[in-house]
Image (tube, rainbow, N blue to C red):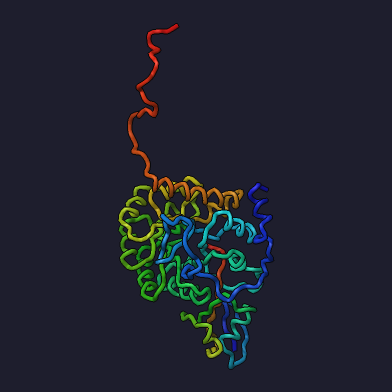
Amino acid sequence: MTSLAKATAADPRFTESSTASVPQRWPSPGDEHVGKDDHGADPFVIGGRHLRSRLLLGTGGAPSHEVLAGCISACGTVLVTVAMRRVDALAHGTVLDVIATHPGVTLLPNTAGCFTSREAVLTARLAREALGTDWVKLEVIADERTLLPDPVELLDAAERLVNDGFTVLPYTNDDPIVARRLEQLGCAAVMPLGAPIGSGLGIRNPHAIGMIVEQAGVPVILDAGIGTASDATLAMELGCAGVLLASAVTRAADPVLMAAAMRDAVHAGRAARLAGRIPVRTHAVSASPLEGRADLTTGLL
Amino acid sequence: MQIQINGHPYELPADATLDQAVALVSTTGAGVAAALGDEVVPRSQWVLTRLDPGQRVEVLTAAQGG
């Protein structure tokens, strides 16, 4: 067990029974209590709401509810995605029990597994009814092999859901034109992929992500493809407003430690973006002044 | 009458309503939503929604994902 895991194990929030009473309504990102971000000068705002963490955590792939709870705390997220699935009458506790033990953490239901606009819209409406939030991570995939978004169905579903009052965060390809169309339809953010879901390939086309950031008037959240901390940092350095990841943490050898690494990676990348990196040069630029050097060329000895 | 709940057949009284169907798969009803065919039925309407034989009911909740 890592020292971090020991620390979280001692935290009473992780020792509560998973069968603790479940509230009838879970906090949603639209609630006032989500509150101000910790960086007053650098607010992270989606759909008019301040979020105090730029890291969004997907809950898929966690080996247990206990590990998931540790990851949520360690990465500092305030927004976690969940899928909508048939009720399992035999299940011992649900992901909602985990969320209920983390005050301030809110749900972002997704439409994972939907192949058509019709399925995605119905799933979003079920999520709104079940969880009391009109925020949705819109995901309309083309096939199971690639899990890549189907842009035609995605745009159609985005339009329907925006018109139905949803705050829509669409998972999209790294295509600047589709991203622009999604924003024009009224999406609250755009979430381009770095690489296919679960691949851990990192950001395969940083140039495209940079172009999306450059033109976007809504937050750009890098979603999918993150493999390790440096990928998350790169996303933030490219100007993304946030990062959404799941597998990189939940399927890591030590998920809680990786969750902490991702928290730091996002902070570092954001700070570096704001700080303004030096230009890339072909040749060296001395970091030490040339003036004032001793004359050692003629041989003092 | 027989109806399909989450893909499985269940036997319900002839005058059964949607709340009875949901109760068969969710003891608390917390954090769940129900769809009849392609329509989401708000929780407040469950007791008022009569079921017909052979109808498909989907009862969903949040699961790990994304």
Is any atom of residue A180 visible in this view? yes
**In the image: residue A60, left or right of residue A48:** right
**In the image: residue A172, left or right of residue A265:** left
Residue A217 at x, y percent in the picture: 33, 60
Say above or below: A264 vs A183. above
Quadrant for residue B15, please give it: bottom right
Q: Seen from this angle, which residue lies furthest top?
A: A301
**Which residue is rendered at x = 36% and y = 51% of the image?**
A209
Residue A298 at x, y percent in the picture: 38, 8
Quadrant for residue A71, please give it: bottom right
| Count of numbered badges drawn on the protein | 0
Residue A201 at x, y percent in the picture: 46, 48
Using the image as rendered, state which of residue B46 and residue A7 is in the foreground.
A7
Say above or below: B6 vs A232. below
**Which residue is rendered at x = 52% and y = 61% of the image?**
A78
Using the image as rendered, state which of residue A138 and residue A47 is in the foreground.
A47
Is any atom of residue B25 visible in this view? no
Say above or below: A64 vs A90. above
Residue A51 at x, y percent in the picture: 46, 61
**Which residue is rendered at x = 49% and y = 48% of the image?**
A265
Q: Seen from this angle, which residue lies furthest front?
A: A292
Work out which quarter of the rendered image holds the N terminus of chain B and state it.
bottom right
